Amino acid sequence: MMAANEIFKKKFLVFACGGQLFGVDISTINTIIEKRDDLTRIPKAANFIDGVINLRGEIIPVMNLKKRFNLPLSEETEDARIVIVKSTDITMGISADRVKDVIEIDMQSVEKNEDIAAGSIDEFLTGCVALGSEIVCLLDIHKLVQP
């Protein structure tokens, strides 16, 4: 049990997407792979699902956060990655422009989204935190991957 004066910290993977930084709880990450061209499109899938990939025999949908959150679309570079996350029984890939770092966050420093965001993105955030001069939006993977 933590003493009252101990700080609760968690590790997050930080990645860039559409000019925005996002953080994902490291415990939800399965793996990170290079962006692939062999996505298979799925008819009538949501517009933010780019398609599915076959990763070691598992079919995994790949979500495009730029489309999901109406962020600026940009050309992919060689730094582009797919972050594979797992929430309960759902595995999903998230397209990232680049993976930045793994950081440890004092959870008491997180600004809750009801103080910051309004609109469609706020239901998928647990809050935001300052990383130097940049802001990282912390994603709630469990809510984000639910159908």
Image (cartoon, grey):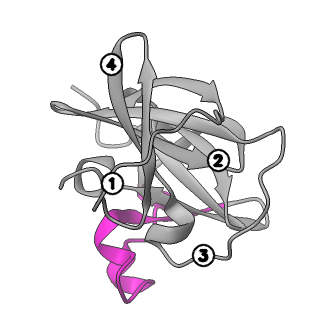
Q: Which residue is mark 2?
A: 15
- Could you say which disc has been placed on residue 140 in the image? 1
Q: Where does the image place residue 96, in percent across and percent down from the top left?
A: 63, 48
Mark 3 residue type: Leu
**Which label lies toward us, 2 or 4?**
4
- Could you say which disc has been placed on residue 58 in the image? 4
Whether tag 3 and tag 1 are in contact, CB under 8 A, the answer is no
Looking at the image, tell me whether mark 1 or mark 2 is earlier in sequence order: 2
- Apparent side of residue 18 relative to residue 56 in the rendered image (left or right): right
Q: Residues within 10 Å of mark 3 (few under 14, many from 20)?
A: some
Looking at the image, tell me whether mark 3 or mark 1 is earlier in sequence order: 3
Q: Where does the image place residue 17, in percent across and percent down from the top left?
A: 65, 59
Q: Label 2, label 4: how many angstroms apart (C-alpha)?
A: 24 Å
Q: Secondary structure at mark 4?
A: strand
Q: Which residue is mark 3?
A: 71
Residue range of the region highlighted in magenta in the rendering: 108-130
The residue at the point 83 percent across, 47 percent down is 77
